[in-house]
Amino acid sequence: MKLVNKTNIGWLILAIATFLILQLAVSTGLISAYYEITLVTILINVILAVGLNLIIGFSGQFSLGHAGFMAIGAYTAGIISKYFPHYGGLFLGIIGGIILTSIVALIVGVPTLRLKGDYLAIATLGVAEIIRITIVNMQNVTNGAAGLSGIPYLAKWPLVYVFAVLTVLIVVNYTRSSPGRATIAIREDEIAAESMGINTTKYKTIAFVLGAATAAVGGALHASYFSVIRPGDFTFNKSIDILIIVVFGGIGSVTGSIIAAIVLGILNVFLQPFGSLRMIIYALALIVIMIFKPSGLLGNKEFTISGLLHLFGRKSTIKEEGKK
Amino acid sequence: MSLLEVKKLTKYFGGLSAVSNVNLELKSNELVGLIGPNGAGKTTLFNLLTGVYQPSEGTIDIENDGKKESVVGKKTYTITDMGFGRTFQNIRLFKDLTVLDNVLIAMHSKSKVGTLKSILRLPSYYASEEKMKQEAIELLKIFSLENKISELAKNLPYGEQRRLEIVRALATKPKVLFLDEPAAGMNPQETADLTALIRQIQKDFKMTILLIEHDMSLVMNVCERIYVLEYGRMIAHGTPEEIKANDQVIKAYLGGE
Ligand SMILES: Nc1ncnc2c1ncn2[C@@H]1O[C@H](COP(=O)(O)OP(=O)(O)OP(=O)(O)O)[C@@H](O)[C@H]1O
Ligand SMILES: [Mg+2]
């Protein structure tokens, strides 16, 4: 395994090519201002879903509070960048959001992740609600239920794109490393993992905090792109929306989460004209897909470049991969 | 000094005492057998020694850095880190992961590869990753599994899964290895081969091994000392010759066969 190998270069080219295509589509007006909102929503959902997948799909813990962590990121970045309306302020806000979220995640995670079982789900469910209610009640800082408006629009889509790529890179690097393998071992068999010397609480907590931190980044970008945030944007429904992307793409598949965010984002656009029927059709579409593919689009497999090349019959690449 | 010293160890499950008043001692560099009929409490004893269960009564002391230390109340991973590895009677491999990953996972805690280093992919990350992989392959070679590194653990034939369990336990670099019926379900030839291999690694790695095994004759052949459990109580302890001649053992164990 080297830094400069075919797979890494392949992904780098894919990331740059996608960016250039999007850039072209935006500048020629193919992606109108309206569809740019869809693009950014998809990118933010990629960040949120990949982070949640790290918690659910890799450490095997169940978090239902992603929207809560997103809210912390959104409000921290929103408030700070209103004071400092330039990129410095936004980055300060993102970092502040990450730190604050990590602290809250530690407070929730350390006691619950010591236990075996799905205690995290209940705890995060409660904490997300506490976060939202706190925001509603901190009237003089957050402007309460009315929400925060006039947040400087700094997170243009290319910046969101860069953050999405970075988030994916961080999560993939982590999951494909020694600590990442330790984390996956916990998902596979907690008792065996512990018998192999793995501090299960520690790695469950790392995955949880890392996942929560990415939610803060997603929230911060959301605030900066849309300029308006309300506590109502970060309810339990939002957590479920992200959970749906993770489950739909395949629990434990990063590429699955990315594809699911794109597919569901586009599906939402097509369903726009259906008005209130939209949610019903959306739900039905999900049900149909889950019936035919219960483990999600990709299961726990990853979409790989060598796999794609294989599909096109270029078997030589595969052979080389195998030789390594 | 003994590596492990167990005194008056007792474990109740409700009204049942699965292990009662057990004394046991392991010195460095020995291969010790633990035998007893089904339900005698052998696996429960292993679970107590490795912190999976907490004892109801009694003490478990180990030698750590030349000092005597109690492991009661310690977490399983801490005990593993102190040099006590184990295998499981009901194979508990990471089934959906590759053979290599199974071994690498066991090497993780001693490898000291940190989270930040992994995320940032510093050059030293690739170096330690490569080193771990080479070490893992060396261990797999001992058990003739080096050609299977990319296979999923669940796709290995049964006997190889049992061997991978041992490789994985060895990868934690134990001073003491607890093997829970490593040859269960194997045919007599496979069992004999595996037992010979266990004897070999015990010598090569200068380890202490506590071996649970149902096949009496095998245990008699390779072990220096043998403990016999029955209904949770240690009914006998001694050299193979002493055990063979022990009336209680003959009645409880051999007689029942
Ligand atoms: N977690 C548990 N809860 C309740 N009872 C248990 C538990 N674990 C073991 N036991 C009981 O303790 C006794 C000893 O079981 P153990 O598995 O230690 O026996 P063993 O000597 O390993 O037997 P075998 O040769 O069949 O593996 C049995 O009666 C078993 O049913
Ligand atoms: Mg047993």
Image (spheres, coloured by chain):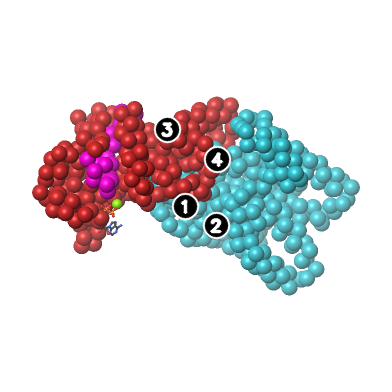
Chain colours: A cyan, B red
Residue to which mark 3 is pinned: B142
* Parent chain of label 2: A
Dot 2 or dot 1, earlier in sequence:
2
Circle 4 SS class: loop
Residue A140 visible at all: no
Provide the chain ID for the residue under circle 3: B
Q: Secondary structure at mark 3?
A: helix
Say which amino acid is labelled 2: Gly
How much space separates mark 2 and mark 3, taking CA atoms? 47 Å
- Give the CA separation, mark 3 to mark 4: 17 Å
Q: Nearer the viewer, residue A34 or A42?
A: A42
The residue at which mark 1 appears reads as A108
Residue visible at 21% across and 54% down in the picture: B257
Figure quadrant of the C terminus of chain A:
top right
Which of label 2 and label 3 is nearer to you?
A: 3
The disc numbered 1 marks a residue on which chain?
A
Residue at left offset 69%, top offset 55%: A261
- What x and y, as percent, mark residue A50? 62, 49
Badge 2 vs badge 3, beta-carbon distance below 8 Å: no
Give the image quadrant in which the ligand numbered 1 is located.
Answer: bottom left
- Of residues B118 and B211, the one nearer the viewer is B211
Q: Which mark is residue B150?
A: 4
Q: Are marks 3 and 1 in contact (CB under 8 Å)?
A: no
The residue shown at (45%, 32%) is B141
Determine contact: label 4, label 1, CB under 8 Å.
no
Q: Are marks 2 and 1 in contact (CB under 8 Å)?
A: yes
